[in-house]
Amino acid sequence: LDLLSDPSTLVNILCDAPLVASPGRKLQYHSITGGFILGEIVKRVTGKDIRAYLQKNFARPLGLDQFDFGVPDKLVNDVAPNVTTGMKLIKPVYNAFQRAFGVDFYSAIEMSNDPRFLTAIVPSANIVTTADQACRFFQMLLDNGQANGKQICDPRTIWHATHEQSYGEVDSVILFPFRYSMGFMLGSRRANPYGPRTENAFGHLGFTNVVAWADPDRDISCCIMTPGKPVMDLPVLHWLNIMRTIAKRCR
């Protein structure tokens, strides 16, 4: 956690890490590390850190006052804490989360509530917002980059960001077949986070039971935020059924 305030050291650690597979040979979700690489690219191309870039190009033009990487120190106690719920994880699921996060599942929950995490820039892991404002971001993507009478994104950028880059291979971290674009988890006709017959939907899962997505076929943008983490319990099925019901009712 102390290294989060020193992004250059984090990038150097990642650059020095040995390869574990040939590039392009293995589908593997990078839940934390990938964001630091993207943040560094944004900084080198634009001269701004990714938080400043997000605010200038997205949050302020969209009128989103609670949509940022982390929060100021004075707002740390306003963030809903993540909590452990449900049954204890069985070993295969526990191991999968440890591969994804680099620490065990319960330590990840504790660390996600730490002020060092909540005030840092963790590009792929600590956007703090409300469900409404996340939906407004995805609605802008549905509307070809337009919002509030402004062109926030070039439509070609959205096309590239949502165009399929993997084709249902089993992700070696999540241990489940996923379709990915350059920036999103994509839906499908069968099992996926957004419900059945959602092959054109795009979005992303957050820390287990958080999800935000847009579905062009249904013209909807959605976000569900739950701070409880019942990975191995009946409530997970209820949570998944919310997306299934939305997909079935909205046609």
Image (cartoon, helix red, strand yellow):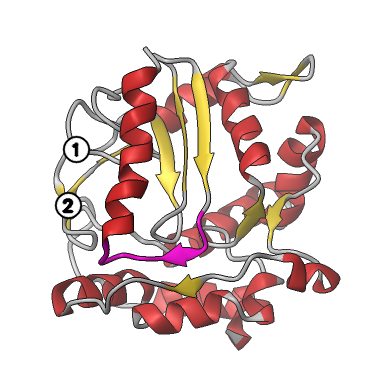
The mark found on residue 176 in the picture is 2
Q: Is residue 48 visible?
A: no
Q: Quadrant of the C terminus?
A: top left
Residue 229 falls within the magenta-colored stretch = yes
The three-letter amino acid code for the residue at tag 1 is: Ala
At numbered mark 1, what does the secondary structure look like: helix, strand or loop? loop
**Location of residue 116 by image quarter:** bottom right
Predominant secondary structure in magenta?
Answer: loop
Q: Nearer the viewer, residue 145 or 229?
A: 229
Is 69 above or below relative to 14? above
Is residue 74 placed above or below 171 in the rendered structure? below
Q: Residues within 10 Å of mark 1 (few under 14, many from 20)?
A: some
- Type of amino acid at the residue the image marks with label 2: Phe
Q: Residue 30: horizontal and vertical position, in percent?
A: 36, 61
Dot label at residue 191:
1
Query: Label 2 vs label 1: CA separation?
Result: 10 Å
Task: Using a 10 Å C-alpha cutoff, classify the residue at mark 2 as few (fewer than 14 neighbours), some (14 to 19) or many (20 or more).
Answer: few
Judge whether 114 appears above or below 181 on screen. Answer: below
Cβ–Cβ below 8 Å for labels 2 and 1?
Answer: yes
User: Nearer the N terminus, badge 2 or badge 1?
Assistant: 2
The front one of 14 and 153 is 153
> Which of the pair 39/104 is nearer the observer?
104
Q: Position of residue 228 (x, y in %)?
A: 47, 65
Residue 129, x across and y down, in percent = 67, 51
Image height of 164 relative to 219, above or below: below
Q: Position of residue 134 (x, y in %)?
A: 61, 40
Left of 199 or right of it: where is 90? left
Which residues make up the magenta segment?
226-233
User: Does residue 37 show up magenta in the picture?
Assistant: no
Q: Residue at x 64, y 25 (%)?
A: 153
Asked which quadrant contains residue 80, the reply is: bottom right
Q: Quadrant of the N terminus?
A: bottom right
